Structures are given as C-alpha cells and as structure tokens.
Image (spheres, rainbow, N blue to C red):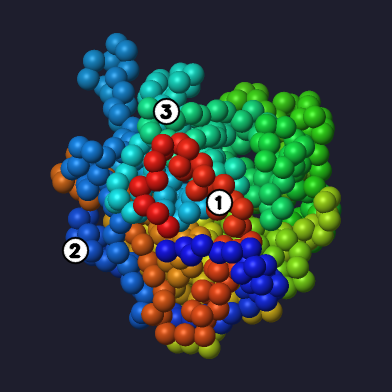
Amino acid sequence: MVPRLTSTIVAGAILALAAPAAADTEPYFTPLTESAPVTAPNSDEELFAPWVVPNGVTQDNLTSMAEIEADPTQSVSRAPDISVPGSGEQDVSAGRSQSMWDMAAFDATGRYVFNPHESPWSAGLSRYDTWADRNELLWNGDGQGALGDWSNDFAAFDPATFTPNCTVLTAEEWSGEGRLFETTNPYASVEDIEVRELDSIANVSHEGLRFSHDRKTLYYIDEWRSGSIYKFVMDKKGDYTSGQTFVLSVDAFAGDPADYYNDPSNVGQPRTGPATWVPISDEDGNPLTSVDPFRNGPTNDPRSNSDTRGGRPAADEVNGTPYGRPEDMEISRLANGNEVMYFTATSETAVYSVEMLSDDTAMVRLFAGATTPTNVGFDPTTGVLNSPDNLAQDALGNIYVIEDAPNGSSTGGDIWFARDTDDDGVAESLDHFLSIRVAGSEATGMIFNPLRPTQFVVNVQHPTSTDLDEVPGGFGDAMWEFDVRRAGDRKFIRRLYMAGFVNVIENWRELRRCRKAMRKQQGRYARRW
C-alpha cells in the first residue's frame, strides 16, 4: 500500500534523503557456484521453480500461457499459422515463437506489467494485472506480415517502456520494418485502446529503450553486428513526436562504421574512450544524411541492400561507432552525479557504460565482459558470462546482466549482479545471481517493481513447451515474481527500501498522473490505495 503523503512530509523526506542512489553495494546474497542443468519440457522445475536461486530469494509464478489460455476471461497473443496462397498444405508456422513474451514494463503504480510479443508476425502488447491475476491482449497485428504485407501487421516487439506520460512504447526488432509504437491509453478497455506510430524515431532493430533522468531524451539501440547507439532529444519534454536524433561516435574510431564490429577493417579500432553525439537530423527532425533515418524497411545489411531500415545506414554516414549486437540498456548515475547509460553487446560478451559529460560529449568504458572476475571474495563459480542480452536496475542503481541463453544448450542461462563498489562505470566483479533450467528458453524482461523495491519479475521466453504441437499441454511462456527481502543482508535490504521510497518521492508527480490516467481510462478505480 502506498501512503498518502502531505506536502510537508514530502518536502521533509526529499531534504533528508536527497542524495542520489549509487551502485556502491557488495552482493547481498551468497552467489551460485555453477550454471543450472536444463530439464525436460513441462518438468516440475519448469512448472514450480525454473530458477536456481541463492538462499532467501523466493520465486512465484504469476501467470503462464497455459493459465491464460485455460481461462476464457483472459487473452494473450499467439502468432497464427498463415496459409500461403496456392501452396495447399504448406502453411507458415511460428512454432514456439508464437508468443515470445519479452521486455516487461511495470507501470508507475506497480499494478500492471506490460509484455510485448516478439513474434515474427502478429506481434502485439499484453497487459497483466497483478492485483486481479488477469492478462489481456491489448492489440496485435493481422498476421499478413508472414506474407510480406506489414500495412496492418507488426513483428518482433522486443522492448517495452512505460513513459513519464503514462503511455507504453514498444518497437520492432529483427522482423517487421523497424517501427516504434506508442499505446496512448494503456489502462483502457481493450476495445478503446489507441496506438500510434512515432515517425520521429529512426527505424532500426530496436531493443534497448530508456529515458534520461530529465525525461527530455530517449536513448535507443540498433541490434545489429554493426549496431549503433542513438538518442532522441525532444523539442519539448513529453512530446515524443518532435525532436533531434543523434548517434554515438567514439572520437578515436577510424574503422568502417558500415562493417561488422569484428570485420578486419574494425579489429583493433578503439570503441571506448571520449565520444561525441553526432546529429543525423536537425532540430526540426529533418534528415541531415543522404539516407532518410526514418525510412521503414527490413533489417538487412545496408552494404548490399538499398531498402534496409534507414537508421542503420544513416548512422554509418556520420561514423556511428559499430558494436556487436548491442541490445538492452539502463540509465543511472555515477558517483560523480553524471548520467550513465549501460548497454549490452551480445556478440562481444560485453557490457559498456557511457558517461554523459555534456549534451554533446560522452565517455565510453567497458563495464563488464568475459575477463571480469566472478564471485570475488566468495566461492568461485564454473559459470561464465555468455551472450549478455538484457539489463535490469534496482532502486540503488545496481545493474543485473541477463544472458540470452540457453536456446538449446544443456546448461541454463544466468543472471549476474554487476558489482561496481566505487561506482565509476567499471565493475569489479560479476556475482552469479540466478540460473534458469527451462528447455529451449531464455530469461528476459527482468524489471523491479517501482513501488516494491525488493520485488522484480522475469519472463521465461519461447520455452520448448510453448509449441503445443511438440509439447501438448505445454506450460509455455511465463512470468515469475522474485523477492529478495529475506536474502540475508539486512543492511542492504534497508538501503533498498529507503532508495525505493526516495524514488517514489522523486517521481510522485508521475505516479499521481498515472493514477489519474488509470481512473479516467477505466472509468472506475477498482481498489483504493
């Protein structure tokens, strides 16, 4: 329950607790010592405890494909089999990619979780009500993208971000046309949901998507083996339709930005150090490059294709530094108070930090990678960092790294706690936090509840059990809730609660705005706070 706060209490709390949270904590748990073995589809482990966790960390299932589809009052998305005209029995099937719950987004009230579907066609957005234990598919496409018609279809929704305007952003990654969409009334009844495409955002393979602390900048990523890092600076805070787009360029990089990060032209080229945000549009959003950054298109190689989505070749024109499949990101602050972006580079087994030095300049560092020590000061682990994909951040600013694995391997994917005790943007240790053991799956969408700082959710994406042809009665994609409040280090837990309270105070206006939007869009308020 969130208490009502008088202006006097709020002012006093801000004065007393104004120091920004800093990721300067030791691990609050005893790290794992190995990665988990993968179990059979629909095993007891998948149904009741899919993660191996440290002592004191609890895991509880919130919902699953099996639960939702067994309840006629709920709904969820499955990309349908599509018949190819004239092919007879040869249908296009999505298999276990039919649902693909990805980067979950909590709303500001902590009540709703929004899940994008990373399906290859007929992608959409679901809303899960944690109070009512009820999932609803808000909208999705018509499936004709499987045949090349994207006019009323959408695909590969990877990121989801709840905005300061109490709306939801989601965007296309490896399929579709690289578009970003805003659900403008996400609390409304399904029949009243409104969605718009934001043509102001460059078309890329979207994954990471986060706002700056001042809410005037939207950072995002192109997930490609020559992927760049972008930012969109709004003309007016809160207006996502108008602004200027920039791409990150490391000053000393002298390779070929159109080539892959590990092509001969780029091997040995510096991709850390001082960097500059180079514009690819003017202040009115007009392209400054010969290629229109806002052009729709497939996610292919611009070196051999002239139709690829425009943000990629536009970045190449201005020497946007290439990274190996940059994926998710988080925005935080360093000990010196500067804003910092963390992003994963999956193909490089790396996580980078980008410290913002001014509006136009930055410092890029390797935050963590294959050579970062693990479990420092604890028993060692045989687990190793493998394909870092997603990131999460707790109320204290600690960063968690989620692997894109196992995807068919015999050892489960891991989640790591990045220990940066001096809070300088370089981790001293990766501490083995969780390990999944669900066949064919990856962990994704890890995000902390904004009002319950010891709790977070994680999705199990595309497990083998989602494909009902292969696993009849399969459990399928699922969402799990974790709580660390009994993990052992009481000092850390107290700090985490305090930091969460400070975050609520600092974002109180957004919280009130979203509660008001909820009442207006639902025409009711089912439960008083």
Q: Residue at x 51, y 53 (%)?
A: 108
Mark 1, secondary structure of its residue? helix
Say which mark, if any, is on residue 63. none
The answer to which image quadrant residue 244 occupies is top right
Is the residue 320 above or below the residue 146 in the image? Answer: below
Task: From the image, state whether disc 3 or disc 1 is nearer to you.
Answer: 1
Q: Which residue is mark 3?
A: 192
| Whole-number angstrom distance, CA of label 3 to CA of label 2 | 40 Å
Q: Quadrant of the C terminus?
A: bottom left
- The total number of labels drawn is 3
Mark 2, secondary structure of its residue? helix
Residue 193 is situated, as x and y percent measured from the top left of the image, at 44, 30
Q: Which residue is mark 1?
A: 512
Relative side of 440 to 25, left or right: left
Residue 102 is situated, as x and y percent measured from the top left of the image, at 43, 47
Is the residue 228 above or below the residue 94 in the image? Answer: below
Q: Which residue is mark 2?
A: 44
Query: Please, what is the three-letter code of the amino acid marked with disc 2?
Result: Asp
Residue 203 appears in the picture as rendered: yes
Query: Please, what is the three-letter code of the amino acid marked with disc 1?
Result: Arg
Q: Residue at x 67, y 28 (%)?
A: 294
| Whole-number angstrom distance, CA of label 2 to CA of label 1 | 42 Å
Task: From the image, state whether disc 3 or disc 2 is nearer to you.
Answer: 3
Relative side of 468 to 382, left or right: left
Query: Please, what is the three-letter code of the amino acid marked with disc 3?
Result: Asp
Q: Pointer 2: residues within 10 angstroms few (<14), some, or many (20+)?
A: few
Is the residue 522 above or below the residue 40 in the image? Answer: above
| Whole-number angstrom distance, CA of label 3 to CA of label 1 | 22 Å
Q: Residue at x 57, y 31 (%)?
A: 179
The answer to which image quadrant residue 200 occupies is top right
Q: Pointer 3: residues within 10 angstroms few (<14), some, or many (20+)?
A: few
